[in-house]
């Protein structure tokens, strides 16, 4: 009896630990879905990579992509249809035009500026700080030397 119970428990645990792969994604759905963001609000995946069981956005989106692809609609037209319905938030990555181009260029520009600042700071901090004493006239040196000797002579007394 204990043997059956352990076996049943093992089978139950194995069934619960199966990865949430959902249904197999067709190649055309994967190709187009990689360009579209999952808008369920729970994940940051694309329509092709969302693995949430029963996702309220991905399942209908995959079916729509598959139906449109089988009807002979081009990839660009499918993506444009999603953008027309959902807005630019439907795209997984911003378009490389207009303000989206600034988003693509901002990261490398800021990274290069940061590296340049770090290089400048390191070069600046490695330079030896040499501060030579200002040149003084002999008369001034003699005057200060006499004043120092007077002050020190008070301690001798």
Image (cartoon, rainbow, N blue to C red):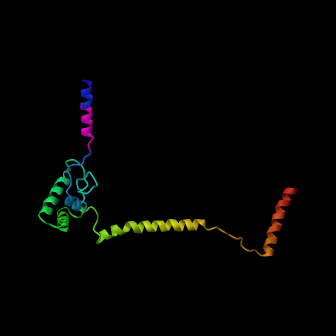
Residue 14 visible in the snapshot: yes
Using the image as rendered, state which of residue 118 and residue 8 is in the foreground: 8
Q: Position of residue 8 (x, y in %)?
A: 24, 31
Magenta segment: 8-18
Quadrant the N terminus occupies: top left
Which residue is most to the top? 1
Q: Position of residue 131 (x, y in %)?
A: 67, 69
Q: Quadrant of residue 157 in the image?
A: bottom right
Using the image as rendered, state which of residue 17 and residue 46 is in the foreground: 17
Q: Position of residue 93 (x, y in %)?
A: 29, 63
136 left or right of 30?
Answer: right
Q: Is residue 129 above or below residue 51?
A: below
134 left or right of 43?
Answer: right
Residue 57 visible in the snapshot: no
Q: Is residue 133 above or below residue 30?
A: below
Q: Position of residue 135 (x, y in %)?
A: 74, 74
């Amino acid at each position: 009896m204990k043997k059956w119970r352990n076996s049943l428990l093992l089978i139950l645990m194995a069934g619960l630990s199966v990865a949430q792969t959902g249904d197999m994604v067709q190649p055309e759905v994967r190709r187009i879905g990689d360009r579209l963001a999952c808008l369920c609000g729970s994940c940051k995946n694309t329509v092709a990579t969302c693995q949430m069981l029963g996702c309220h956005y991905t399942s209908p989106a995959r079916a729509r992509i598959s139906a449109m692809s089988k009807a002979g609609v081009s990839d660009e037209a499918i993506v444009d249809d999603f953008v027309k319905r959902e807005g630019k938030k439907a795209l997984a990555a911003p378009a490389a035009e207009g303000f989206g181009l600034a988003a693509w260029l901002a990261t490398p520009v800021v990274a290069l500026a940061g590296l340049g600042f770090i290089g400048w700071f390191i070069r600046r901090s490695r330079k030896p700080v040499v501060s030579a004493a200002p040149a003084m006239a002999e008369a001034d040196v003699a005057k200060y030397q006499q004043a120092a000797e007077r002050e020190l002579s008070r301690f001798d007394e």
